Amino acid sequence: MANARSGSLATILFLFMSSAALHKGECQSTTCGLFHYVNSCCVLLRCLFLARRCMILPSGAAQDPVVSQNLVTDNVTVVEGEMAIISCRVKNNDDSVIQLLNPNRQTIYFRDMRPLKDSRFQLVNFSDNELRVSLSNVSLSDEGRYVCQLYTDPPQEAYAEITVLIPPGNPIIEARDEVLSEGNETEMTCTAMSSKPAAIIRWMKGDKELPGKPKVELTYDKMYTVTSRLTFTVSKEDDGVPVICIVDHPAVKDFQAQKYLEVQYKPEVKIVVEFPQGLTREGENLELSCKFRGKPEPQRVNWLKVDDDVPSHAVITGADLYIENLNKSYNGTYRCVASNSIGEAYDDYTLYVYDTAPSTEPAAHDSRAGEGAPRTVDHAVIGGVVAVVVFAMLCLLIVLGRYFARHKGTYFTHEAKGADDAADADTAIINAEGGHTNSDEKKEYYI
């Protein structure tokens, strides 16, 4: 407050002395000089009155400034190096003077005049109801509370806080191990230096977020350095996956650094049957292929037979096994083993050699499972078919029997018609239907 009063008082005295010197140069006579001396005294009195009203000079009757809703302003948040706008607004002004003071209470603008020799401050707008000033190329030293002051009785004040944001430097990500082995634990650190306020660091492994342990340090220049430490266990699926350090700060967006994982792991092995596609039978050939992958690439691939030796005429070419003219003595489990500097792994194939193909080919199945003897014919199906045939034949015989029995009775009846009164067989034949005469005796002849 004392600095502001001293500066304002110096300004008024400067105006008074300039006026007195000007009048002194214009008049040389004693009467004229006396007149202008009295006029200068009046000017000084008016200045002193203005100083008293504006509280530039201390006075026991003066009152402290008050915060009023009639004078309003806004807090400002700005990134270092950018521009801040400070606005002092008056809702109801009675022609009172508006001025803007810096955090040291030095006058930046008095109405539309700038006493402060800092060209970064520029007038944007001045009216009875507003004083708006811009501050370019903001630095951390500009941070603080700025005062909007309205010269009333008592004076009114409003405060605008300028907060300067300083973005962190590029994040630095470091790994304890450049090359990892599956199942091992590793550690990474990410550092965001010289920011204000302190940055927040998050970790992502692929699309999964991982928790880190942050550490915040306040440096001598009132900046913050944040270091986050991440510890996790890797698997073979993490090979080639990016680990991302994301820095959240109000002054920057999408600020991150990443590092790709390199994970070594033991081989993965799988045996594929190239031939045959169905059952393995005596006299046929067998071709197996061993598929594998690992990091580093497996350098050794071996074929062996569990609990026995590989047949002497079997051919092994790299990762392939070829056996000609199969027979049952080759039955057993064949194993492919692949190894690298991390470890070894294997896969098994169980061979079962079947008899040569019968007339009725059983359904094919995977011989890898080592299942037992070939499947037998389903006798229940055959028995059912036979039963249906026998039943149909019985039904046919019954129908035919009934048919012939009915037609046989009709033959006897027609044969005897008209022969009821014949005396003998000859007479009956003569009297039968068809123009023969009747006879008293019935006789039947079989031809």
Image (cartoon, rainbow, N blue to C red):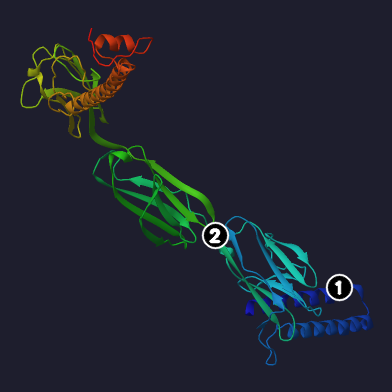
Task: Tell me the residue that label 1 is attached to.
Answer: 22
Cα gap from disc 2 to disc 1, whole angstroms: 50 Å
The residue lying toward the viewer, choosing from 39 and 130, is 130
- State which quadrant residue 394 falls in: top left
Left of 343 or right of it: where is 208? Answer: right
Is there any visible trace of residue 337 in the rendered image?
no
The residue lying toward the viewer, choosing from 320 and 117, is 320
- State which quadrant residue 274 falls in: top left
Residue found at the far bottom of this picture: 61
Q: Eyeballing the image, is 377 above or below 256?
A: above
Residue drawn at (93%, 81%), measured in percent from left and top?
32
Is there any visible trace of residue 92 in the rendered image?
yes
Question: Considering only order in the chain, which callout, 1 or 2, is on the residue closer to the N terminus?
Answer: 1
* Disc assigned to residue 165: 2
- The picture places residue 332, in percent across and down from the top left corner, at 10, 24
Give the SS element for disc 2: strand
Give the SS element for disc 1: helix
